[in-house]
Image: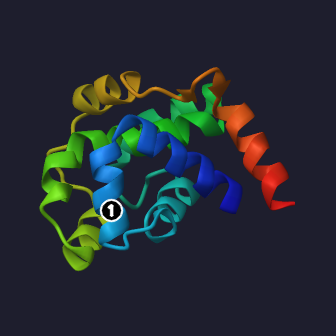
């Protein structure tokens, strides 16, 4: 999971540098919310209807989509999260707001860039796996 966290963090910094810096300053590390999102495929964090749509695309596209979704969620919530501290941020990320709609979320997910330079998600992940071996 450490390689996945590192890959996610690099992509988060690439897509949302201001939010990434804020989450770091609040000590809201990916392991505090991302593990729960990924292991449950978002079923605990959002409505079952929306989670089901994510499951469908995950089954088609694989792991990368779960991390793209996480960044898409944070992109939609960026303004709220920038005003939160550790406690309010962790509560927010545990149970995402009900106002999150499929249309908003999938539009946000589509705008997420899953590469840094020429390295795509899988190449970045492999690099971090090798670094941690």
Coordinates of residue 16 in the picture (x, y in percent): 33, 41
Q: How many marks?
A: 1
Residue at image coords 34%, 44%: 17
Query: Based on the displayed image, in which of its 4 quarters is residue 133 positioned?
Result: bottom right
Residue 48, above or below 82: above
Q: How is the image coloured?
A: rainbow
Q: Residue furthest bottom?
A: 87
Residue 99, above or below 87: above
Coordinates of residue 9 in the picture (x, y in percent): 51, 51
Coordinates of residue 75 in the picture (x, y in percent): 28, 40
Query: Based on the displayed image, in which of its 4 quarters is residue 64 positioned?
Result: top right
Residue at image coords 64%, 20%: 118
Is 81 positioned to the left or the right of 6 in the image?
Answer: left
Picture quarter with the N terminus? bottom right
Query: Based on the displayed image, in which of its 4 quarters is residue 120 positioned?
Result: top right
Label 1: which secondary element: helix
Residue at image coords 27%, 47%: 18
**Residue at mark 1:** 23
Can residue 1 be seen by looking at this rendering?
A: no
Binning the other alpha carbons within 10 Å of mark 1 as few (below 14), some (14 to 19) or many (20 upward) gives many
Is 18 positioned to the left or the right of 97 in the image?
Answer: right
Q: Nearer the viewer, residue 39 or 108?
A: 108
Residue at image coords 53%, 29%: 114
């Amino acid at each position: 999971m450490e390689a996945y966290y590192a890959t996610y963090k690099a992509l988060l910094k690439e897509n949302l540098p201001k939010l990434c810096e804020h989450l770091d300053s609040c000590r809201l590390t990916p392991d505090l919310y991302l593990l729960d999102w990924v292991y449950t495929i978002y079923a605990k964090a959002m409505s079952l209807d929306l989670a089901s749509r994510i499951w469908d695309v995950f089954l088609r596209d694989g792991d990368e989509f779960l991390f793209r979704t996480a960044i898409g969620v944070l992109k939609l919530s960026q303004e709220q999260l920038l005003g939160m501290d550790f406690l309010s941020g962790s509560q927010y990320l545990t149970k995402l707001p009900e106002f999150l709609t499929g249309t908003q979320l999938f539009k946000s997910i589509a705008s997420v860039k899953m590469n840094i330079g020429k390295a795509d998600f899988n190449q970045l992940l492999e690099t971090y796996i090798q670094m941690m071996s």
